[in-house]
Image (cartoon, grey):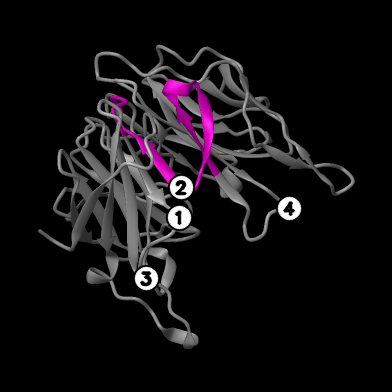
Amino acid sequence: MLGRFVSSLVSAFVLTTTAASAAVAPPQPTRGPLPGVTERTGNGQVGKGRAAVVADLNGRPIQLTSYGTIDFQAQGNGFALWAWQPDRRRFIKTDYEEVAVSPDGRWTVARLESSREPGQDRLRILDRTTGKSRDVAIQLTEYTPADTENGGTQYPQMRWPRWSPDGQKLLFTVSLARQGDRSAGVMILDLPDFTPRFLKIHKALVTVGGFEWNHDGTRFLVRHGRLGGTTVRLYDLQGKATREYQVRGRPGGDGRGVFSPSGKRFVTACLPLEKAACVWDAVTGKAVTRLPIVAGPQPTTLGWYDEKHLLISTAAGIGIVDLKGQVIETLLKLGRASQIYPHFSALK
């Protein structure tokens, strides 16, 4: 087994004791305001931001699992991650950097803010069916060394956890220590034991988002090249490049992911500052459509909602948009100055 895999049961923290399974979807966030959101007012002061769930999220192919906020008055970067806790029916402020919920709603995997030792990333794995959790420590410097240029030391990091569509694998982007916008490779954790497996893949461009799954979990993909001239590359589960699309933009991995559920199309944020969503044909690589992103609170391309709709930002907040650019439904209503970074993932 590659690397050092250390896990221990943790009794001090339990996300939930509510049983969940693939057959019964966990409760989704209800309509109402989201806590912890701030914004800068016109006089430079910091006030309470406006962000709310405005639709019934139950029975959908996606789930709102977490969102990030910024506290402008806090020391440091002031970032906080709020995770949805189904048994308590509310969002809880955490000390996690990131969190990812499996498509069947059973597993929550959180990347912890601090490590026990340099060059080590720690994950907290929570099983909602048993209410138990365990910590997993992965020594990244075994795969890619630290960098000590300019008198300081930088270490590689695991970022952007992504569940495979079948919920059997978890994909992390591993950054290159000496160059933060380039990858050292990917770390794949295989269920049921969450055994880590590292694949070396250099030179992928990971400025905003990293590696993502394709529609059936048999491949993963990433933006490649340099800003102003990038492509999208597909890799197999052994880390071999299998295809390269000559398309523009960052793959949008939220919601149902980069590829539509059938795998016939994929989406990227294809203009600077995320001003447009581009849909491409997965067979030919040719453009299908380009949808302008309106100047909303956080302009961005998230990913697919279903086969015919995207999950992207709208003038009101975050909504479901068809391939002609028509807003079908608003899910989150956001104030224009509100600092919030929501994360949606797939739900079986």
User: Within 10 angstroms of label 4, few (less than 14), some, or many (20 or more) residues?
Assistant: few
Instruction: Compute the Cα span from label 3 to label 1.
Output: 12 Å
Residue 258 shows in the view: no
Residue topped by disc 2: 96
Considering the numbered disc 1 on the image, is that residue within a helix, a strand or a loop?
Answer: loop
> At x 68% / y 54%, what residue is drawn?
74
Instruction: Compute the Cα span from label 2 to label 3.
Output: 17 Å
Amino acid type of the residue tagged 1 in the rendering:
Glu
Residue 139 shows in the view: yes
The answer to which quarter of the image holds residue 285 is top left
Residue topped by disc 1: 113
Numbered label attached to residue 118: 3
Dominant secondary structure of the magenta stretch? strand
> At x 68% / y 36%, what residue is drawn?
297
Q: Earlier in the sequence, mark 2 or mark 4?
A: 4
Residue topped by disc 4: 73
